Each structure stands twice: as C-alpha cells, then as structure tokens.
Amino acid sequence: MVKASQARQVEDAILQMVRMGQIRSQVSEKQLLDILEGLRESKAKEEVKIIYNRKGFDESDDEEYDL
C-alpha cells in the first residue's frame, strides 16, 4: 500500500520531467525506479536539519546596560 502523498509526489515529478522535455515517451520500469530513488534521496536530505539556537537581540538588553 502506498501513501497518497507519496503517490502524488511521484506524479508531480513525472509531470515536471515531461514539461522539461526529459520524458518523451512512456515511462519505463527503470525510469520509474530512478524517479522513486531520487525522491527517496531528496526526502532523506530534507530530514537532516541543523538548527542553531542563538540568543536573540532584545531592545530591553540595551536598557540594562545603559546603551
């Protein structure tokens, strides 16, 4: 069973490739597997995020130091 969101991503990727002229005929099984692999890799890259929490500038800090 496939999630509807994943099926939609595959459809969107194929449509985009058709619009860009990368696909000119029926999609073969190998092409479909390549598209699926590409989506899997791009999703893996999206999941890795580094967030730096730095102290933000607050105007009230100026008042404490008479700046």
Image (cartoon, rainbow, N blue to C red):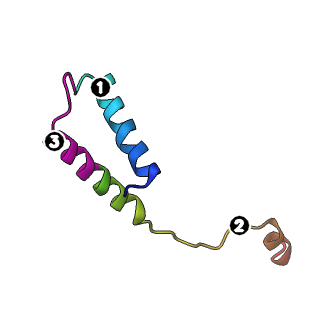
Q: Is residue 14 magenta?
A: no
How far apart marks 3 and 1 lie (CA) works out to 16 Å
- Give the CA distance from mark 3 to mark 2: 54 Å
Q: Which residues are magenta?
A: 23-38
Quarter of the image where the C terminus is located: bottom right
Q: How many marks?
A: 3
Q: Are marks 3 and 2 in contact (CB under 8 Å)?
A: no
Label 1 is placed on what type of residue? Val
Query: Could you say where residue 60 lies in the image, as x and y percent from the top left?
Result: 83, 70
Q: Is residue 58 left or right of residue 42?
A: right
Tell me where residue 40 sits by quadrant. Answer: bottom left
- Name the residue carrying label 2: 57
Q: Nearer the viewer, residue 56 or 21?
A: 21
**Residue 34 belongs to the span the image colors magenta:** yes
Under mark 2, the amino acid is Phe
Quadrant of the rendered image containing residue 28: top left
The kind of secondary structure element at disc 3 is helix
Q: Residues within 10 Å of mark 1 (few under 14, many from 20)?
A: few
Side of 54 relative to 1 (left or right):
right
Residue at image mark 3: 29
Numbered disc in front, either 1 or 2: 1
